[in-house]
Image: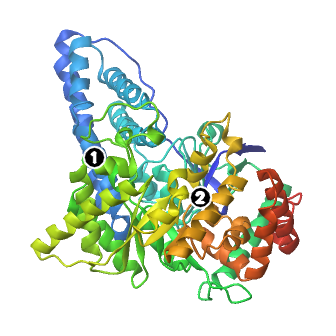
Amino acid sequence: MKELHGIGVSSGIAMGKVHLIDRSKVKYTPRFIRDENIDSEIRRFSLAIEDSYNQLQEAQEKISEEHFQDFKHIIEAHMFILKDRMLNSETIKTIAEERVNAEWALRMVHENIVSFFKKLDDDYISERVSDVDYVVERVMRNLVGKEQESITGIKENVIIVSHDLSPADTAQIDRSVIKGFITDIGGRTSHTAIMARSLEIPAVVGLEYVSEETKSGDYIILDGKKGVVVINPTEEVKDIYNECLKRFEEEERELLLLRELPSITTDSHAVTLMANIEMPQELESVIEHGAEGIGLYRTEFLYLNRLELPSEEDHFEVYKYVVEKIQPMVTTIRTFDLGGDRFLSPVHLAKEMNPAMGLRAIRFCLRELEIFKDQLRAILRVSAYGPVRVLFPMISGVGEIRETKVILDQVKEELKKRGTPFDENIQIGSMMEIPSAMAIADLLAKEVDFFSIGTNDLIQYSLAIDRVNEHVNYLYEPLHPAVLRMIKGVVTSAKVSGVNIAICGEMAGESIYLPILLGLGLKELSMNALSILRVKNILREMSYQECKEITEKALGFSTATEIHNFVFTKMSERFPHIFGPPDQNG
């Protein structure tokens, strides 16, 4: 038995036999070639490119479900990479000039491309580099004549283990037989992670060498919430996880009974529970878990999966699908939160020393107006198909929001001239995630219809810590007194001004924080769809008065640790089956 720990990206427990999909790097023999063989080697490479293109086209045609349409774009991007000069022409040039075989030339070019993008030092861009990896490995397999195993051929219940899974792989997963998957690489925002959540199957990624430590036929357990994988467990461990699985499935069934029940406390304090989404594929889960609308629709994915900028029509078609699916409930569309470093596109900007606080989000939009206007036109157009709110990220002051409103008004005038219908009174909101915005909430409240608190960045900026820096990430404390005081202040300003206020950061989906958020005065929480019923379950068992008392007491402590210990103790006493100390079975 061996236990491994990775990144749990989609909760749930899965148990079963391993089906190993070989997506590891192809081994080849580098060799020099004679001058008279250069043309035949180039033809061999061109044929491998053609075979790869045809295989991707075939995979794309198999994607028939409407809500998987975005994955067609990903595969289109891979087909585009196959024809890209940086990969295609450079490999041919390397074969001819270096007089090396096609595999060696392709690997050299691949390493140069990866090295170039790695210098950008950005999580998103690093994960998008995986697109190039997928394409190169497919070409390499065709060069060496190695079969590209298809996931569609799997007919028995299995857990997939692989070095990585391409979008072409994940888009073809059949949930009736594939109970979960684990991979060597990947992160929370990788294609595979997003797909796992949209399919609602357990998944653990970032296990480094799991594809080398398992073989087809091994028995495996994966816990997608804790990120734990157990290879060839003992019968005793199997029994333990079988019990955990039964409890989990029983809890899920019980939680689903809450779906139609109102989100209210025991003393009838109503709270709106909404969903955060990144892709339309998540809508089924949003509806199944009883979300009362989309509180945060992150639109970055539409840009990141293309090698060219999306057009107004590209935006419109995707947003229209979401809005029509969710209406009559509201969809809150956040304009893109990207900067120059995050584009695999024809937007050329100088590298920045600190992109997290550089030219990104609304700052980038106000500089690249045509890109911004394409998105705004699309958002306004879909407002004719259902209730839509537009949310602007990283607002730091009144000047920025006023400048943004001027641009929005210009776009409205353009649409009027076109005769295009839209909601002229579309609500606009400001993300509250920068301390300066929190400090002048009373002034910003005069400019917008609603606030949405983004706790992820707010905590990072307020405490001056990089949450992905292993040396300081322990300082990432949602219950820091400074954070709670800022939230309290902005809620007060919003109430005084009559502005609606919501929270859409990860704090909202952690049920242990629920009494604090309610006690601070928040009534609209937006979170991952899978968290909604768990939060509702706690909500319906607590009174608003109780939440206010817990919060009042918590605000009297001086440190995040003191507050956490207090809240954890309170919640453990109230809900020992949920927050109690873990038993020996985990």
Q: Quadrant of the N terminus?
A: top right
Q: Amino acid at mark 1?
A: Arg
Q: How is the image coloured?
A: rainbow
Label 2 residue SS: strand
Question: Which residue is identified by label 1?
Answer: 367
Query: Is 310 above or below relative to 101?
Result: below
Question: Which residue is identified by label 2?
Answer: 158
| Residue at horizontal 62 percent and vertical 88 percent from the top | 262
Residue 129 image position (x, y, % from top left): 40, 38
The quadrant holding residue 572 is bottom right
Question: Mark 1, residues whose alpha carbon is within 10 Å: few (<14), some, or many (≥20)?
Answer: few
Residue 409 image position (x, y, % from top left): 23, 66
Query: Is 192 above or below relative to 147?
Result: below
The quadrant holding residue 299 is bottom left
The quadrant holding residue 180 is bottom right
Q: Quadrant of the C terminus?
A: bottom right
